[in-house]
Every structure is written in structure tokens, then in C-alpha cells.
Image (cartoon, rainbow, N blue to C red):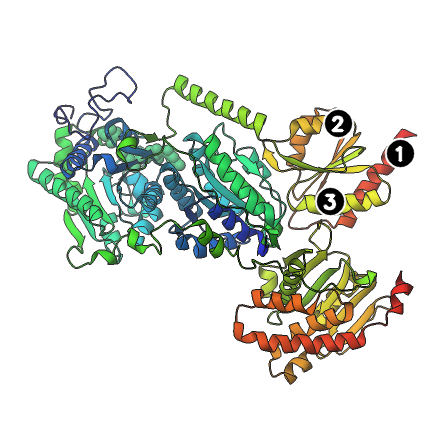
Amino acid sequence: MSRILVKGNEAVIKGAILSGCKAFYGYPITPASEVAESAAINFPQIGGTFLQAESEVAAINMVYGAASTGQRVMTASSSPGISLKLEGISYAAGAELPMVLVDVMRGGPGLGNIAPEQSDYNQMVKGGGHGNYKLIVLAPNCAQEMCDLTMLAFELADKYRTPAVILTDGFVGQMMEPVQLPEPVTELPAKPWAVDGTPETANNLVSSIYLEAPVLEAHNEKLQQKYREISDHEVRWEQIYTDDAEIIIVGYGIVSRILQTAVEAARAQGIAVGLLRPITLFPFPVKRIQELAETASVFLVAELSNGQMVDDVRLALDGRRPTKFYGRMGGSVPSPEEILQEIKKLNNDLNKNGN
Amino acid sequence: MAKEILEKPESFYGEFTRKPGANPESTHYCPGCGHGVVHKLIAETMDDFGIREKTVFVSPVGCSVFGYYYFKCGNVQAAHGRAPAVATGIKRALPDSVVISYQGDGDLAAIGGNNIIQAANRGENITVIFVNNAIYGMTGSQMAPTTLLGQKTTTTPRGRSAENEGYPIRMSELLATLEAPVYIERVAITDAKHLMKARKAIRKGIQNQIDGRGFSFIEILSACPTGWKMTPVDSKKWIEDVLSDYFKLNVLKDKNGALKKEDTGITKSKREKEVEPTKKEIMELLGGTAQTAKVSFPQTDVTANYLDPRIKIAGFGGQGVLLLGQLLAQSAMMSELFSTWLPSYGPEMRGGTANCHVIISDKRIGSPLVSETDVLIAMNLPSLEKFEDEVRPNGVIFMNSSLIKRKVERQDVEPVYVPATEFADELKEPRVANVVMLGAYLGYTNLLSVESVLAATKTVVKRKELFAINKEALAKGFEFGRAKAKPKKHKEEVL
Ligand SMILES: Cc1ncc(C[n+]2csc(CCOP(=O)(O)OP(=O)(O)O)c2C)c(N)n1
Ligand code: SF4
């Protein structure tokens, strides 16, 4: 089959259309704008809707409205825009609306810059908005996955009736790589809960209000049960050279690509290092990390942030193994050579302690 | 109030069982509250028009947040101020439904001010019911944007002052300045005469939507006896004497009749395609079938030093360095190799310089960032100065010797001086200097076949009329590069 050379941001829209997504509502922001621009080209061609909203707040609420009708719908933005969307995201989680949100992360806080960072981990994976909710968070590291994981996001969002996120960064979004388009999804799941303007759904209600404490508590319990189910069934990761690894390095998104190059170089020098790349950030590969701790003696987490995912690795390890952190911020990206230095340092320390 | 809705319209639930508490007969509204009356007018219209089952009611945050207790139709509850945005999403998904967006004055004129202006300005084919009671009812009588000067609320305990809080906003007048809305009217629900007018206005607003005419907005001056600390009777009198003196009851806009259906609203006709596209059509429009038959390009024999290159291409904006990179990545892909292309983006581009990183390999590519550079293609002097030191020992630097007058300073790299701009000028097309450079790179290293690059050019360069000149430029560069290439024995030396 033939492949096409596309930007990660464009691959997202290809995946969305192949998933039967029919509407895109967004507001321009670098480095996510190509997602909206591709949507503006493609959605009208399939009889769908593209609308540039007046703000990210409006966009997420338009998505909320469209999702209420049962339509597959999405939005995309970058960090500051995501901050604005959080109230709406919380409403969608509370009202159990499936939708796909794309966050092409950039440097912060504040206006920061447009270079890649991974500092939205907490606001996407840990909630960010108000209330006891979680989002399914997928972290692609190449253009192919920008397409494939977008398709998976639509599937999981519908399956669990919850918003799903593509958490990526400026590099993966702007990078061009070959992509093989999967077959279009032809059968979409039924949504008997939706409000779609038909007699069958005229008694349906999309809402996140539960006035009485016991009722809201029960609703929250139901949500937590759903999140447990997601944790039980939807964990995804990739690993390279982990079997005999003494050192495990953990990274997601663009960082995992840099780590891969560094790990290959370290292996060539005889260092027993392996890479674990979480593909789902929620659910987090807790069990896999615990299994790796049985053979590995030290973990190194690399992120383009002040250390956000590292908390989850530490929680998973629960003190069983030392966990080091290597972070860069502000759009600075480490080279594979710099990571290799870190690996070497760790390896030297291990050997010293071992002696 | 409770009396007024005794004869319930069909579009209300018989019993309000969604309402918690013991009394499913009555509403949750205070005695004398205008919301219940407005609800009833809407429900009666739904009955009369026979649209209950295709109506979607969007309730806001405010006292009417519980609209779904009453309306026996599809209900969607929206975040504070966002009902017009939510209604937009619903209506665009369901063009044949009737979407009623219902909002209070805090919701619509304060927190959601921009959302209502923009929905009106887009001419969304929805009906907006705006209940103006000059106060925040739900949260305990705070000031609204519509609170009158001097009016006491819990957050204007000394009365609203123009100096501190500004003047009450007349939303209907404001929206009437926009081009798109088809119908805007302000009514009140005090006596029978006004009720009749309000009923007519609501019916007209909903009929407009059914006819696909576009955005209708009905502002209703409505009592909040609790917030105003008045009896229901005094409240009605206050609306008549005071509130409607500032907010004049009037038709602010009525484009009915003057408009053709196609000019208004976001009806289905605005969409480019009505039918579901087929699988094949989808693949086609996404570019998935662009290269159907697998093409085999001639194998090239590449010296080890030039294999799996990590390439950095730099120049000033307009020299086509990004395109050069894309051509490389595209032809590598077409030659069944892995490739990545990473641009510098954003303000970096605006400074006038641009660069991109390209990696080509027969193995899956890790980092797409080029830090240690195997090949630098420098189109101008700043690029050479910036990146010369990053080139690894034995790496290659291709530089545009037409524009860069100095030599490469490094002694441990292979410099190749290509007069790319001069060649392009000879072809009378200065823009193809990048393709000359690409040709030189390929001629020198033999990395990819000329055929694959020509095929890539067909895909990447959208303007077909440029193909011939690009082909010429490529050939010229290629010939030059080949002539400069090290004789084969160099291969053994390197190995
Ligand atoms: C983001 C947000 N801010 C504030 C509130 C609190 N709040 C609820 S209703 C309301 C005002 C409603 O007033 P209005 O729109 O005039 O409706 P009324 O209650 O008078 O019918 C406010 C401020 C909220 N729910 N959400
Ligand atoms: S507080 Fe005012 S608006 Fe709210 S229900 Fe009571 S009277 Fe109606």
C-alpha cells in the first residue's frame, strides 16, 4: 500500500475523518493550527462541519453541543487554549460525552513560547479542570500514530463515554513522516443516550448537574468505576531492549524518539539500558513498570517539563527502585548525545555501587 | 405562578419527576417568577407547531438551569454563558431539529457576552430566548449587566453607579447592529396584552428557525420578585414603569420577507456535500490513493559515509529550504526508506531564516532532530556560520557558493561548493536554486535515484507548470555534483 508524507497535525485530521468524525470546532494557536487548517479543507468535503469558534471556550462548548447529539466531534489546541477549555472538558466528563481533544503542547507558563514542551501532563492526565474526573490520554510519537491513535481515541471515547485526548507536542505535530492510511471505519456504535432531535430521544437529557449529595456521590462512583475499567483494559506501551536492562528510561511523545536513539547508542557501547514508552498516559502502565522493577535496578524519567510524569513512575515504583529525573523546559530539547551522557553517568554509578 | 401552568401544554411533562423533593406538580421557581410564564409560552408554541419531538432545549446556568424538569423534549444543559455555543454545535449536527437556547441576563450578557454576539453574527439558525430580570437570581441577587443605575443588589449595596459598574447593557439594540440576525424583539410579560405580544414574538422566532431563516432573538423583561425584594404585583408594576422605560419594548430588527432562505442560517444547503462519501472517495480526498501502483526506483550504490544521512538544510526564507527537505523526505519514502522532515517553525521563520532537519534511513528513525549533522546544505552565509560546527568529522557541507564568498573553515569535513544561484539564474528561474542544490547533493552522494526525486517533485510541487524547469535544475545540479564526486577508491579509504 502506498504511503503519504504528512505532518503529524494533518495526520490527526486524516485519522479523524477515517473514524467518521463529522465536525471540528477550534481556535487558531501555534503549533496546533495545522490541525484546524486541515479540518477546514477536509470536513466540508465530507459533508461535515468546520467552524472557527470565537475562542477556545466557545469551541469546547460547541463540541459539547455536537457530542450531545451523538456525532463524532473534535477540537484541537495548544497549552494556553487547553487551559481555557478546562471548564468545558470537566462538563463533558461529568455529562459523559465522548469527544476527542488534541493538545499540541507548547512552552509555558503564561504565553511562554511556541516551542515544544510536555508541561500539560498534569492538566490533561491529572484532571486540570474541577471535579473527580479523568480523561483517556494517548501520547503518539510519530505521524503514523497521530493518525492511528486519533482513531483509537474516537473508539475509546465512544466505548467509555468519556473525552479522550491526543497529548502531543510541537515537534510531533510539525514533523512530516510517511503515513499509511488505515481503512475507514464504517460502522459507528449506537448512542441511545444522545439527544438527536428524534421522537426516540425526546426524553433524553445531557447534563452534569446532580443536586443532591447522595445522587452526585453515586454519579462520581460510577465515573470512578469507569476509570478503573479503563485502567484494567486499555493500558498501552512500547518497550525496546528492556529484557535484560539494568537501567530503564521512561519517556513519551517526542522524547521517546530521542531516548530511542540514545538507548541504541548506549547498547552499542555495551550498557544494559532499555526504554519504556507509555502510549497511554491515563491509564498509566503501572503494572508494567512494577514488572520491570523486578529486573532493573534504576529508573530514569526524561520529560520536557519540570517533572510531571515522573510522579506517576514514582507512585508505581512505591520506593522500590531509585528514580532519577532528567527534565528540560522552555522549548529546549535534549540531543540523544546529552541523554547518552546521563545514561553513562547512571551506569558508572551502578558499577561503582556494585563493586 | 403555579396556577398559571395548571393547564399544562403537552410539551411539558405531566409530572415534574426530574425535580427532587416531594412536590412534582409545582415548578422550582419562586411565586411571581417570570421564568415559568416564559416556559409556558415556549411549550405552547411547541405544541401548536407540533415540534416537541424534534426540539432540543438548551438550558443555561441560572434559575432556569432546570429547564429539563419541565420540557418534554431533548434537553442539553450548558455551562454558564455558553448556551449559544452549545446550541451551535447541536444545530450544526442536527440541521432539521429546532434548537431553543434559553438564557438569563447574567448568563447571556456578562459571562457569555461574546458567545451570543458571535452566534448572532454567524446567523446561527437557532432561536434565543433571553430572560432579562435585571439581576442574578440563582446566586442570590447580585448585579447583572442589565441592573439599572441606582438599583440595589447584594453586590451593589449602595445602588449601581455608572462610575463603578458602567451602564446597563441593552443587548437587543447591540445585537441589532449586526448584519446576520433576522429578528430581534424585546417584549414583557406583565399584562394580557403584553403576554399576547410575547407569545407572538416567541412563535415568530421559532417559525423563522423552522423556515431556515437564521438567528432570532427574543428578549423578555421578566420579574424576579425574590431578587428585587418586591411582591409579584409590585414586580409587574416595576417592569411597566421603570424597567421598560430603560429597556424599550420594541422590534429592533425584522428582516423577514426581505430574505431568501439561502441567504440565512446555516442550513444543509451550506454544506458542500449532502451525501455520505464512499470509502473510496474518503481515501481519495485524504490522498491515500495518490500513489496506487508500487513504483520501483533504480537501486543506488552509496558510499558508506553518505548512508543514513542526518541532514540539515538552511537558508533565508524564500530560498525554498523547507521544500528541498520535503523533496528529499518524499523521494526517500517513495524509495521504500524511512524518512523524517522537521521544520523550524513560528517566529523563527519570520526572522527571515529557515531550516529543516531531514533524516533518511533504512531503519526506523529515533530522534528526528538533527544535532550531530552528517550533511549540511547551506544556502546562505548565516546558515553556514550557524551550523558549520555541528557537522561531524568526515561530514559533508554543500554550500551555495554564489552567495557565500568564503570557504568552509573546518579541515575535517568534505566541502562541496555549488554555484546554485548562478545555475538557477542561467535557467532564468532564481527560485530553483534549491533544486540545483538537491541535484548536486544526489549527484555527489548517489543517495537516491533521480527518478524517485522527479516523482517526488510531482507530488510535492503543486504547480504542475514548474515541473519542467525543476527537472532541468535537478539535472544541472546532478551533473555538477557527479563531476565533483570523489572517485570510488575514496570508499575504501573511509571504510
Ligand atoms: C463559571 C461560573 N461562574 C459563576 C457561576 C455561578 N452562577 C450561577 S447562576 C449565575 C447567575 C445567573 O444569573 P442570570 O443569568 O441572570 O439568571 P437568573 O438566575 O437570574 O435566571 C452565576 C453567577 C457558575 N455556575 N459558573
Ligand atoms: S430567584 Fe428570581 S429568577 Fe430565580 S426563581 Fe426566584 S424569582 Fe425566579
For the residue labelled by badge 2, is the local secondary structure a helix, a strand or a loop?
loop
Residue B264 in view (yes/no): yes
Mark 2 vs ligand 1: CB below 8 Å = no
Q: Amino acid at mark 3?
A: Gln
Q: Disc 3 is attached to a residue of which chain?
A: A
| Disc 2: CA contacts within 10 A as few (<14), some (14-19) or many (>=20) | many
Name the quarter showing ligand 2: top left
Position above or below: B116 against B462: above
Quarter occupied by residue B453: bottom right
Q: Read off the residue under disc 2.
A: A293
B13 or B136, which lies in front? Answer: B13
B445 or B251, which lies in front? Answer: B445
The C terminus of chain A appears in which quarter of the rendering? top right
Position above or below: B479 against B55: below
Residue A328 in view (yes/no): no
| Disc 1: CA contacts within 10 A as few (<14), some (14-19) or many (>=20) | few
Q: Amino acid at mark 2?
A: Ala
Q: Amino acid at mark 1?
A: Asn
Q: Read off the residue under disc 3.
A: A260
Distance of label 1 from label 2 (alpha carbons)? 18 Å
Badge 3 or badge 2: first in the primary sequence: 3
The percent position of residue A221, horizontal first and vertical second, equals 47, 20
Of circles 1 and 3, the one toward us is 3
Left or right: B449 in relation to A40: right
The percent position of residue B84, horizontal first and vertical second, equals 32, 44
The percent position of residue B352, horizontal first and vertical second, equals 61, 68
Quarter occupied by residue B85: top left
Contact check, label 1 and label 3, Cβ < 8 Å: no
Of circles 1 and 2, the one toward us is 2
Mark 1 vs ligand 1: CB below 8 Å = no
Q: Read off the residue under disc 1.
A: A351
Distance of label 3 from label 2 (alpha carbons)? 20 Å
